[in-house]
């Protein structure tokens, strides 16, 4: 079966390349707005499934990977900042605190319509950050397309002091350990 990554994220693309499988990337057009009363884990699970299903429709013979991620600070969902001002606000709120990232992962089989899905949490603790550190980081990294304004695979690592989770790839947005299991369930063995 043909493998498709339903994402516009270059970070997810880079992670999936590690598995050395041929795949195509198609960006889904999905409204990522939370619904009323939707929890962070329900939101990312729904969006991962919607992204995978949307790309799978009309593409027989495909397995489609969908993923979505949000950060949660003090019980509040924090997504991509998209602006410098919002990124400053996010990083000030996270300074000195633990933040949980929830990543929804889905693998949709276009032929059987079977979907495997899971939500994987990952917790990070931020160092206490000064405004000067925040400004310097944002000027150098510009992580405006990263949940919570942290690009941990880049300079964002200097903002953090501790990680807690099963798969470090989850922090970047594509839990490869879980994905490998899902692919194996569909008969795709990596090695």
Image: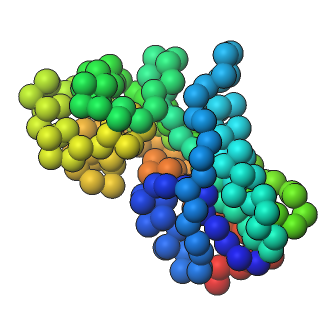
- Which residue is located at x 60 percent, y 52 percent? 28
Q: Percent from the top left, x then y, of residue 153?
A: 33, 55
Asked which quadrant contains residue 52, the reply is bottom right
- Residue furthest to the bottom in view is 191
Which quarter shows the C terminus? bottom right
Can residue 13 be seen in this snapshot? yes
Visual colour scheme: rainbow
Q: Percent from the top left, x then y, of residue 81?
A: 36, 32
Q: Give whichever of 61, 12 is nearer the camera.
A: 61
Q: Percent from the top left, x then y, of residue 127?
A: 25, 31
- Which residue is located at x 67 percent, y 72 percent? 3
- Above or below, comparing residue 18 to residue 120 in the picture: below
- Above or below, comparing residue 51 to residue 110 in the picture: above
Q: Give whichever of 50, 45 is nearer the camera.
A: 50
- Which residue is located at x 86 percent, y 57 percent? 114
Which quarter shows the N terminus? bottom right
């Amino acid at each position: 079966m043909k493998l498709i990554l339903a994402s516009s994220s270059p970070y997810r693309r880079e992670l999936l390349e590690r598995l050395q499988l041929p795949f195509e990337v198609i960006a889904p057009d999905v409204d990522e707005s939370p619904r009323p009363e939707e929890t962070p884990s329900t939101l990312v699970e729904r969006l991962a499934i919607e992204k995978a299903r949307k790309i799978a429709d009309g593409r027989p013979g495909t397995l489609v990977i969908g993923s979505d991620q949000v950060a949660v600070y003090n019980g509040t969902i924090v997504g991509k900042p998209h602006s410098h001002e919002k990124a400053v606000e996010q990083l000030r709120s996270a300074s000195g605190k633990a933040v949980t990232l929830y990543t929804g992962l889905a693998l949709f089989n276009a032929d059987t319509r079977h979907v495997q899905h899971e939500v994987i949490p990952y917790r990070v603790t931020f160092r206490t950050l000064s405004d000067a550190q925040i400004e310097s980081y944002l000027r150098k990294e510009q992580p405006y397309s990263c949940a919570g304004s942290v690009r941990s695979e880049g300079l964002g690592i200097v903002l953090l002091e501790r990680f807690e989770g099963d798969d470090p790839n989850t922090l970047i947005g594509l839990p490869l350990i879980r994905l490998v299991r899902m692919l194996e369930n569909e008969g795709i063995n990596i090695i």
